[in-house]
Amino acid sequence: MIWLQIVILAVIQGIAEFLPISSSGHVVVGQEIFDQFGTKMDDKLTVNIVLHVGTLLAILIFYWRRIWMLLGQDRRVIGLLAVGSLPAGLAFVGMKASPWGDAAESALEQALVAGFMFPVTGLLLLWAPRCHGGETTCRELSYGRALIIGAFQAFAILPGISRSGATIVAGLGCGLRREEAAAFSFLLAIPAIGGGGFWKTIQLVKEGPESTPLGALALGALLSLVVGLISLWWLVGWLKQGRFHYFAWWVIPLGVAVILWQLS
């Protein structure tokens, strides 16, 4: 049963990581459903991070040309990405160092938290049509605006807040072209997802997973990679057509449904 659950969660992760509907929120809700009607997962955070590593590989493949350009004409973007990564990095370190770190991690695994945050993502997406973007490219972005986009990424540590949705909307608000806002958002995801994935991988090597077989985790990472590539291609097309805000009509009702379910 645990293998089937990993497969389902991997597909959810691959779809939801790039579409602005919050992959972490969907995975948390999916895990809660499995807890009630399937096999309980003891290492939810491990599963969540491993599936994120799969979608990180999808970003590296999809944007390999942009990543290669970072070594040439886009060298300035490396500094912008470093600045944009600061808020999420500080939030992660602060949570780990805090006496309430365990409680905070537990909250990030709660379906009720995701339920309250889904509508917030929806409101961000509905604001997107008002942000027509501009003509700014990633390498022309100011460091101050990179920090603003990074702050939106840090906010997305909460399940139910879409990382891609929040950062793309912030990028549009900062004057980036639509395709450039998407590119900066997903380039910014590399250190954010890679940092957490690296930390968890070290833990897995040292301690091993609590209960989930390594083979199931590897399969989940592979599936989230393949599905993620398809979703990323789809999202970029929808963003160019100005349909980004359509996803609000999924996350807002979903949030209401999850809240009613959890409170009942």
Image: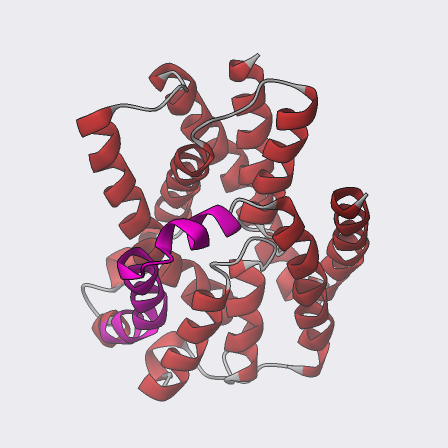
Q: Is residue 98 visible?
A: yes
User: Could you say which is closer to the camera, residue 242 or residue 254?
Assistant: 254
In the rendered view, does 165 fall on the left or right side of 214? right
The secondary structure making up most of the magenta span is helix
Residue lying at 49% horizontally and 33% vertically, measured from the top left? 224
Quadrant placement of the C terminus: top right
In the rendered view, does 177 fall on the left or right side of 19? left
Residue 178 position, x and y percent, is 56, 71
User: Could you say which is closer to the camera, residue 107 or residue 69?
Assistant: 107
Magenta-highlighted residues: 79-108
Figure label count: 0
Residue lying at 80% horizontally and 54% vertically, measured from the top left? 256
Q: Quadrant of residue 215?
A: top left
Please tell me whether residue 91 belongs to the stretch shown in magenta. yes
In the rendered view, does 232 fall on the left or right side of 205? right
Residue 31 position, x and y percent, is 59, 32
Quadrant placement of the N terminus: top right
Residue lying at 40% horizontally and 72% vertically, measured from the top left? 150
Please tell me whether residue 92 belongs to the stretch shown in magenta. yes
